[in-house]
Amino acid sequence: MVPQPCVLLKYGELALKGRNRGSFERHLLRNLERVLAAGAEPARVWRRGAVLVVTSTLPLAELTARAREVIGFSVVQPSLRAAKTPDAAADAALDLLRERFGEDDTPRRFAVRARRRNKSFPLTSEQLAAHVGARVCRERGWPVDLDHPEVEIVVEVDRREVFVSVDRQRGQGGLPVGSSGRALALLSGGFDSPVAAYRAMRRGLRCDFVHFTGAPFTGPSSTYKAYALVRQLDRFQGDSRLHVVPIGNAQRSLATAGAGEVQIVAQRRLMIRTAEALARRLRAQALVTGDSLGQVSSQTLSNLATIEQASSLPLLRPLIGWDKEEIIAEARRIGTGDISVLPDEDCCALLTPPRVATHTSAEQLAGLEGRVGMPELVEKLLANAQVLTPAEAKETVAAS
Ligand code: ATP
Ligand code: MG
């Protein structure tokens, strides 16, 4: 048997604790197949306990990179699949080292970790590790260091084969997108909301997106940003939809009706109400925002409470306890930071009062909201909503 390149994907039993295994694995597999299918021959995926094995015609580096985007896998391990004998395992280990380090003969401290998911094998795990280790010592002249190795060789004995790898990478972790239900994420152009949406996805929520613009008083720049952000976030779930709702006139109505220093909170309540109505149509069970406690004056505890009372759906705020630096670092890691940093015309910058109220209550806003006629206003806004599908545009670009 010629050693065959493959990727091992592990989700571990911990992720499954107290969850429905069938639903977890179904969503995980579907999400994996989606990223593997784009522009490639169908991949082969098979299961060995809580490990999935993937082979494909894609180069191993590409296969590994794609698998690392799939939420739900904690470990992504490019490997060689070899015959189920001690010597084939040692050969595969040496092949991998040659590939990774070439003819560079700088000695590196190494360790072999062997385990047997399947016990029908002539050697124990310790004997197998010692066998592979002895070959590496002899043929590369490297010293063994079991406590602080520079290179770790992992050998896993399975039912029909042995998997060997020297490169264990972290996956996204989390729960497979879709396994917790659906949510509607409120997406502005800033750093926070895309990260919040990503964190919601990482807890298994499939997200739709809604973006509010100040049109007709602002240009299209904020929509372009939201579009680009959804394209990035779509890597983690596929088939994302972005609903764009112009609220410039509604914002002006609130101002004309005398909102004064509660203008911002009133706008946020309008967004939440509109988002709730939209969520119910989309069968989403929760709203997600990028709020972080105390970050700006509209995010005092009092204002957050006033805002969330506008919706009877749960309002999830994954970033509530995050610092701005943590949020920006995460934005860079998931690839939304470079988009969020671009300038745009944000609808919230329209009609900002000179002083923003930090203490508000729903009762205080009731009069104002009565004057503008909320239910009709929300209906009118949704009638003017536009749906964009950034993911499809990506497919077209990829195909051309
Ligand atoms: P962000 O960095 O996400 O823009 P922010 O720190 O600027 O957040 P706010 O502007 O108070 O904070 O917005 C808080 C949350 O309200 C956002 O994270 C987002 O979920 C939602 N939101 C604000 N503006 C819009 C908008 N124009 N369209 C959709 N959602 C919005
Ligand atoms: Mg903002």
Image: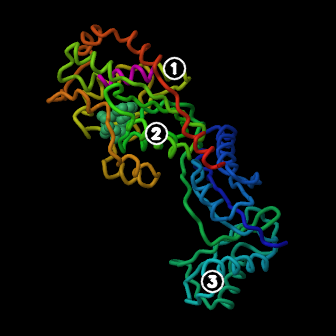
Q: Residue furthest left?
A: 354
Nearer-N-terminus badge (1/3): 3
Q: Secondary structure at mark 2?
A: helix
Nearer the observer, 217 or 229: 217
Q: Is mark 1 within 8 Å of ligand 1?
A: no
The local crowd at label 3, few if under 14, some if 14 to 19, many if 20 or more residues have their Cα within 10 Å, is few
Q: Secondary structure at mark 1?
A: helix
Residue topped by disc 3? 102
Q: Is residue 219 above or below residue 272?
A: below
Q: Is residue 366 above or below residue 36?
A: above
Q: Residue at x 67, y 49 (%)?
A: 38
Q: Tell me if residue 292 can be seen.
A: no
Alpha carbon distance from label 1 to label 3:
58 Å
Residue 359: x, y in percent? 19, 26
Residue topped by disc 1? 280
| Segment colored magenta | 267-276
Q: Quadrant of residue 346?
A: top left
Q: How many marks?
A: 3
Name the amino acid type tagged 2: Ala
Name the amino acid type tagged 1: Arg
Q: Is residue 368 above or below residue 184?
A: above
Looking at the image, residue 78 sits to the left or right of residue 329; the answer is right
Residue topped by disc 2? 197
Q: Is residue 217 above or below residue 126?
A: above
Q: Residue at x 35, y 49 (%)?
A: 341
Q: Tell me if residue 169 can be seen.
A: yes
